[in-house]
Each structure stands twice: as C-alpha cells, then as structure tokens.
Amino acid sequence: MGVRGAAVWAMAGQYLSFAIQFASSVVISRLFLSPAEVGLFSIALAAALLVAILQDFGLSRYISGLPTLGPEDIARCSSVALLFSLIVAGFIALCAAPLAGGYGQPALAPILLIIAATYLVVPFAVVPMARMARAMQFGGHFAVNVGGAITQAAVAVTLAALGYSSFALAWATLATGGARALIAQVLCPSPPWPLRTDGLRPVLHFGARSSVLYLTGALGTRSPDLIVGKLLSLRSVGLFSRAVSLSDQFRMLVAGAIGSVFYPAFARIRDRGEPLGPAYLRVCAGYSAIIWPGMAGLALAAEPLVRLLYGEAWLPTAPLLSMIALTEVMLISLPLVSDLPILLGRLNRLLAYNLVDTALSIILLAVGCLWGVEGAAASRLVYGLAWLCLYWQFMHGLVRFDARAMLAIYARSAGATLAAIAPLALTYAFWAPPATITFLALCGTVLAGGAAWLAAMILLRHPTMAEFSALAAGLPLARRLFPKLNPAP
C-alpha cells in the first residue's frame, strides 16, 4: 500500500472512531456523569498513563525501523511486550492505594486496579499493529481502532446509565483493550509464546532509551490532570480534562491518524538516501493548512459548542477549550519532533530537549494554577510559544528544511485560517453572539468557513492543494466522477 492509500485508511479509521467516541462522551457527560466524576477518572487515568507510556517500550518504532523483519524478531518483540506489560500492570496496582490516600479519594484505588488490568491485554495489540504499520497495511489499523471505539462507547454508556459513575469509564477502558487485542491478533497473529529471551539486547537497548524519552514526555503531557487535581479540585480537573480531551479529539480527527503513516514513510526516504527537508515541508504544509483553521475555529466556537453539546453544567469548560485549542496551533507547527530524531539516530539530543520541554510544561502549569483553572489553561498558551521556540532550531538542523519556504507556508496557512473563521466571527459581531447562536446557525457558519477556506487555499496557491488532488485521485469514487484526476500511467 502506498503512502496516500495508507493515509486514506488511517483517516477513515480516525474519523469513524472519533465520531463514535465523541457521541458517547456527549451522552455520558450530558446525561450521566458530572465534572467531578469525570475528574476522578481523569486523575486515575493520568497517573496510570505516566507508567503505561512504557508499555510499548519503543517496539512500534523499533519494528518499523528494522531493515528486515523475521519470525525471530517478531517472537522477541512479542515476548518483550508481554514482560513489560506485567511490570506496568504490577506497578500501577502497587501505586493504587498510596495515590488514593494522597488525593484523599478512596475510589481512586479500585479504578486504578481496573486500569492496571487493561495493560495485561494491551501487549497483544502492540506487535501486530507495528507489523501492519511497517507493511503500510492500515486497513488493519482501521479495524482495530474502530472495533475498540465501538466497544468503549457501548460499555461506557451502558454502565454509566446503570449508575456505575466513574467506574463506567474504567471498565470501558479495560473492554477496549481486550477488543483491540483480539482484533489485532486475528488480523496479524503475533502471540508472545513461547517466550524468547535470547538475542534481546538490541530490542532492550532501543527500548530503554526510547522509554526514557517517553517517560519524560509523559511527565509533560500526562501530569496536567494530576497537578490540577492536586492544586485545585475534582471539578476543576474535570473541566480541564474535558477541554483537553475535546481539543485532542478534534486534532486527531483532523490529522492525527496520518501521523502513524509518516514514520514508515520517512524510513523509506531515509533508506533511499534522499533528503528529508522537502518531504518535511510538505508534511508541515498539510498540518498547518488543515489543523490551524480547525483549532482556531474550535477556539472561536467553544462556548456555543460546549453549551449545545454538554449543557450548562459544563459551560466553564468553554474558555479553557479556547486557550488549549489555540495552543495546539503552535504545537502542530513542527510535527514529528519525536519520530524523526529517533529515526535519524539523534535520541540523546532529543532527550535533552525533551527534559527542558517537560520542565517548562510542569513549571508553567503549576504557576498558572495560582490563578485557578483559567490560569492553568492560560499557561498552555505560554508553554506552546516556548515549545515552538525550543524545537525550531533543533528540527531545522536535523531535517535541513528551507526556513524561508517554511515561513511562506505558515503565511499561506494563516491566510487560509483567517478566511475559515471569518464567517463565524462576523456572525458573532453582527447577528448572534456566542451566548445566543443556534445550532443551525453555527453549522451554517462552519459550512461557509469551509468554502472560504477552500477559496483562500486556491487563491493563495497553498502547496497542500497538490496533495489534496493526488489524494483524491487515489479514491475510486473520485476517479469515476472526475476522470481528469486520474494520474498519468
């Protein structure tokens, strides 16, 4: 499967999974769970993910980066995944009671034990997913992701309706892990038995270095819920977590799935000895052209979206969502900041940058909490700017992209972004403010914004338009409707 075909499958799986998960989150938040109940689960999940980030142990990237992959390599990687799952699950279980005592929330302990059990089944999906990504077989990823999303939604909504409170989300997490593992093993069998303990040194060496990187990154990305929960309140962490979740889900909807395609794609470019700079510019152009308008629109539409979807109880989430969504604009401006350094053997330098990155995130968030949950969200804007300044020179020296061309791409993307949000901004100014705009009017401005965005992309001659045409040419329906899109033989 080619890169564009893989991207189509990845995006299809991401869009459908997002729709399922988003619908279930709206139902649960609007009908069954309060911000405090969601906050309790968020603290437990964030604590577990600090450790569970080691679950993969770098195996996905290790497998994708191997020049050849034999049965022995698969057996060793599967064995390592299983062994580390036992370590992760055991550590989370041991931390359950102390963490519950530290937060003064006894219910945290059983929730953490349920989440710990999830990591006993996760390794059964790690190696099959990595093998499918290496082979660019993203149709399999589609089945795994959508199957997991359906399971999560069904279990979470059912148990929440039955009154399981925060435990509904915990049991849904366990059910999701089991469903993903089962589907992955059916599609690409990679059982971790019999255990292989010979020849593990290369796997463990790569995994140990990657895990240090993952752990420092997790401290920056997973600790906000823990910090907000400790310094503020369960309600605050529930609101903050919902804002972060909405922003992350929307970003993943727009372009997150494509990221899984890029690592093996850049590995092929590296193996051919071709420069990475031009390809990286195309990636940045695509991300900024799509995600910038999407996140800016989400920030502008935060208040009516939260009110219409989640109800008045969640309305304080809106200003938090606006600030966090704008932060994503900066964080997505330099994609693949972890993948490419690992691919090019610059893991030690990346680790040093990551340590600084993590320290900035934690310190700024702790200071922001002095002004409440709004201050915590505002700290993300400062962090985003610092992050962009930190990684710009690093990625420039690594990939050798043309800085002037990059700035020109940013300028075009910014123009398209302004065009995309203009209809909603004008509606607020001259017709219906955020507090009174209706759902139909909001949808109308979104459609108008999409049309304005497309017109701006064409007028500004954004380089991503060529990628869109090539991607459309790979779709059977588009080829039938628009024969001129067919690539020349």
Image (cartoon, helix red, strand yellow):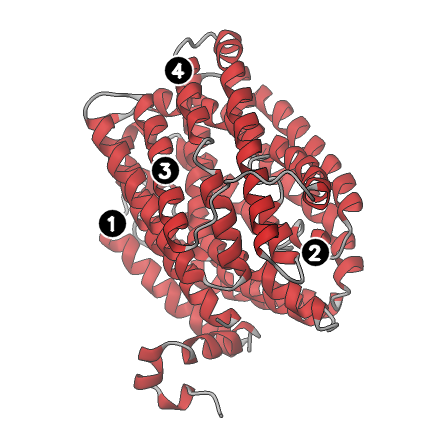
Label for residue 183? none
Disc 4 to disc 1: CB gap under 8 Å: no
Whether 79 is drawn above or below 293: the answer is above
What is the CA distance from the residue labelled 4 to the residue labelled 1?
40 Å
Sequence-wise first label, 3 or 4: 4
Camera-side residue: 255 or 177?
177
Please, what is the three-letter code of the amino acid marked with disc 4? Pro
Label for residue 343? 2
What is the CA distance from the residue labelled 3 to the residue labelled 1?
37 Å
**Residue 427 image-quadrant placement:** bottom left
Look at 58% across and 68% down and name the residue there: 412
Disc 1 to disc 2: CB gap under 8 Å: no
Label for residue 178? 3
Which residue is denoted by mark 4 in the rendering? 110
Residue 298 screen position, x and y as percent: 42, 49
What element does badge 2 sit on?
helix
Sequence-wise first label, 1 or 2: 2
Q: Residues within 10 Å of mark 4 (few under 14, many from 20)?
A: some
Camera-side residue: 346 or 225?
346
Sequence-wise first label, 3 or 1: 3
